[in-house]
Image: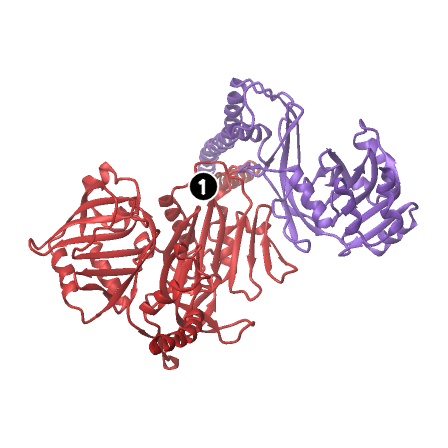
Amino acid sequence: MQWGQIKTLFILCFLILDLFLLQQFLTKTDDAELEQLDENTSAAEQLNLENIDTSDIPEEQPPMAFINGRRADFSEEDLNALDAMEGIDPSLYNKNSLYVKFEEPIPVEAEDEGEEIMDKVEDFVLYDDQYSYWGKNDEHQVILFFQKNNNSTIYFNESGLLMFLVEEGEITGYYQTRLGDIEKESEKSELLQPIQAVYQLYDNGEITSEDKITDMVVGYHSQIQGDSNGIQVFAPTWKITVNNKDIHFVTATTEGRILEVNENEFITKALETAGIVSPQDDNQAESVQEPDSESAQEPDNNE
Amino acid sequence: MNFETLKSIILFILIMLSLFLTVALWNYQPSHDRVEDDLGVNTDVGGLEQKMTDVVQPSNIVFHNIGGDYGFKDPKDEALFYQKMQNWTLYNFQPVESGFPEGQVMSEVVFPTGLPISTLSSIFTVSEEEQEIGLPAGNFKHMLFVLDESTESITEVRFISRDGENVVRAQIQATDAFADLISHHRSLENKQELIKYENKNTRIFIPKNEVTMTDHYISVDPVKVEPLTNALFDDVSRVKKSKRSDDTTSFSDYDSEMRIAEDGNSMKLEKALFGKGAILDDYELITESLAMVNNHKGWTDKYHLFDVTDYQVSYRMIYDGIPVLSPSRLSEITVQYRQEELYRYKRPLIDIVDVYADEEREIVLESGERVIDVLENTTSINQNTIQDISIGYRFIPSNPGKQNVFYTLMPAWYVKHNGKWENINEKLDAVQLSKGADQDAMGSN
């Protein structure tokens, strides 16, 4: 009888204790969320104050894994597939850098972008669906495509590049490298939230009042491209377009660092490693190539 | 009965729930707050931590007498005496007109590189009032105690920059300072005569006569790479190791790369960060780089601060008080910053562990007089680019081209020009031959 009463008492005590603990636990989780929310609101307020338009940025970014990979060799099958294509003259360096010359240059319209360009050349390109359009560079007369991994672009990497060479509005050939053995890290990393990434740009003076963020997507980038044999580690990276023209990259890691990416330098370097001299200096273009008189004369004929 | 059982079950559940909630409450960590994760990771490469006073050491202490200049024969005596000096209190700093004082009895402390005046409060004793006011801006490489024998006092202390342009004077407060200094000026048995070499950028004192030293046969241990990667990368789990085509081993993540030389004896870290921020001044460069290396207990041997230029700080390995001057990759720790961020870090990955004293041989080095004479007649070295002249050691592997455990530290004459130390023993030998012939010719005249 007495034991029964004690039990009732204990049940009451523990009920109260549990309620208290539960309440504590809930406030603690709330606090943590609020803290992050606070950070975001203060960044948003600051940007608002400067009239920086952030209405188009994604709301929130779920955790994402880092990836790593190394430059892949083109396999026997790849080469057989290339041989089967008509009208091209492929050459391979170090098994992993492919240079293809079109026997018949393919004209592209000045206003052609992404899909339209790829539609015209896809029959001559391996793995064409693994690359996404980046843009044209008039200075170097090239069209850049970057390799994708699960729909996220790997920006400016010499080992995941598809670069078409243009002369007089016609594609004369391309240079291609591929990243292979791409592994995802098992653990996903908390990413820098979009508003924080934009705030980094503002904080570093990359954007000023009245600017508008017109596009913002997450992709991958590695600042260590090292050696073509080495494994590269890619960090999730924000690509932020401002006013439809300026493009900035901010690592989506929690530190949020602004990257300095120079397209022209990148192309110059890629052309150099590919052993291709920019088509502007057309006479040297052939000398780098293996002596192959027929196709080598193509550019001259076009002039 | 049934009701009692039910109560027991409810009680049991409640107790369990309270336990569970307590544990959950203790363990709950906001998910974005994982900074403390890497506690307990080993970042100790097995060296020491060093303070500013440990790494900032003079390259030379010179006693200027009317009859000539003298310095310690044994670097150990020099280090001891310098240690004593550090207790003397300095006060009343003020900038004065430029130039080196001449023709007086003076004691001069020469440092390997120009140091910001602000380092003085870390390496000497500076009076408290003075620290509050703040030390004057500027840079010094020479520290001169001007002595007045008639009043038995130190007239003043002068801090003079490399080129003599920037001069700050101070007073000194120490009862025994004058007596200590003057006793060294008068007792010359543990001293050697020095000779001065001067150009428009520098003023150097080196032994006037031949110097007898010994070489040292030593063995080294490799510095562990794992704690180093733990210390230098943000997240080691992300770091990938690969072999490069030049046979170096590379550890890299998305913004940093550490390369280990083919023989495993040196490494180079480079961070591809584009930090925007304040540029570090020389004083901050020294403190930051010290802290960075201390962080992983990276002072595996004795190193002295040897150079601060272009946001880069270099520390030289010191053996028995004598710097090891070549090859640099085995004897120099350099830390370079871009803005406030660590940019490059190069260091040897060897640690001297054993010395085989019975293998030592006596080595006689040319006299400083001849060194200067030869330098003045060597066309390949522009006189005005000479920054320093010193005796240093050279690492000679016992088994060239392979992985080495045994090395000989061979003393030699070195000249620093264009920021690089060059072993000039060959030049001395070469000139000796032609010079000998010249002198014969002169003699016959």
Q: Position of residue B340 (x, y in %)?
A: 45, 41
Return the residue nearer the eye: A207 or B212. Answer: B212
Residue at point 15%, 68% (across, down): B187
Q: Position of residue B29 (x, y in %)?
A: 50, 39
B217 relative to A177 in the view: left or right: left
The chain to which mark 1 is attached is: B
The answer to whether residue B47 is above or below residue B38 is below
B234 relative to B209 in the view: left or right: right
In the rendered image, is residue B301 in sight? no
Residue at point 22%, 48% (across, down): B158
The chain in red: B
Q: Position of residue B265 (x, y in %)?
A: 51, 65
A216 relative to B174 in the view: left or right: right
In the rendered image, is residue B18 in sight? yes
* Residue behind mark 1: B340
Return the residue nearer the eye: B408 or A5. Answer: B408
Residue B178: quadrant of the picture? bottom left
B266 relative to B188 in the view: left or right: right
How many neighbours does mark 1 have within 10 angstroms: few (below 14), some (14-19), or many (20 or more)? some
Residue with the most extreme front position = B445
Which amino acid type is marked by label 1?
Glu
Query: Which quadrant is home to the C terminus of chain A?
Result: top right
The answer to whether residue B29 is above or below residue B213 is above
Q: Position of residue B160 (x, y in %)?
A: 27, 48
Residue with the most extreme bottom position = B358
Q: Give chain A's shade.
A: purple
Q: How is the image coloured?
A: by chain
The answer to whether residue A193 is above or below residue A158 is above
Residue at point 87%, 51% (across, down): A293
